[in-house]
Image (spheres, helix red, strand yellow):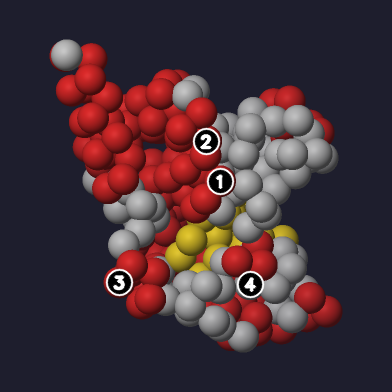
Amino acid sequence: MRCLSILALVLAQVLAWLPTASAAQAYPSTADPYVVAGQDLAGYRIWVAADPAHSAALGVYATYLRQAGVGDVVPVWQLARTASDWAKCAQAPFEVPPPELWPNIVNTLRYVQSEVKPAVGEVEAVSVYRNPMLNQCAKGSPRSAHQLNYGVDLVPRFPFDRRELMSRLCTVHARSGLRYGAGLGFYVGIRFHIDVWKYRNWGVSAEEGGDQCAIALERREAARPNEHDD
């Protein structure tokens, strides 16, 4: 009887992490083109139903993030999304990272909360932790920030023009990225990467649509010699 009560509690927690109908209507489905089959909400429900250990592990992870003050930056279930190539690599579509790597995502989420979301609004996480085997198969760097649970690929819920999105994020990165040790990268469309592993950027050239990024980052570099007194 006690086991059934615990299972019911865990199930209630899992359902609480799912978006409500009103929340789903509040934002357009901008992330749909960047979420592969099996990593959508339906795929998440299948993954949870496949093994009670999945929801239990995610529940512990959610509690840890909540106690760290970042439990509501993005829906917790999205933080379990692995690489888009999960099926091709014969890996799981969702995975809770090892507990020793949990602290790494906390500072990344704090940066998203304090710097990214004020600039672009609500975001959806489309790829986060990748275990070493999946990272290698997906052709990730051997030192990938995703492999260490620092990196998170995001899509804004507002349908930004790519150039406008890049301009906003590069302005934020130029202003506060160095202080946080933040990495910023852009992929196709409006998918972008954030981590707090180390300060760097990629995919910001004018040819890639980042002409405003070049301006923002040049201004930042020009200001750096005068910042030693901060």
Q: Are marks 1 and 2 in contact (CB under 8 Å)?
A: yes
Closer to the camera in the image, 217 or 19: 19
Q: CA distance from mark 3 to mark 1?
A: 21 Å
Expressed as whole percent of the image width and height from the top left, the position of residue 82 reads 61, 41
What is the secondary structure assignment of the residue under circle 2?
A: helix
Q: CA distance from mark 1 to mark 4?
A: 23 Å
Specify the label residue 22 is tagged with: 3
Q: CA distance from mark 2 to mark 3?
A: 24 Å
Amino acid bearing label 3: Ser
Q: CA distance from mark 3 to mark 4?
A: 24 Å
Looking at the figure, which quarter contains the N terminus?
Answer: top left
Specify the label residue 43 is tagged with: 1
Q: Nearer the viewer, mark 4 or mark 2?
A: 2
What is the secondary structure assignment of the residue under circle 3?
A: helix
Q: CA distance from mark 4 to mark 2?
A: 27 Å
Residue 83 falls left or right of residue 17: right
Amino acid bearing label 4: Ile
* Point 69% across, 26% down: residue: 132
Residue 84 position (above or below residue 136): below
Amino acid bearing label 2: Trp
Q: Earlier in the sequence, mark 4 or mark 2?
A: 2
Residue identified by numbered label 2: 47
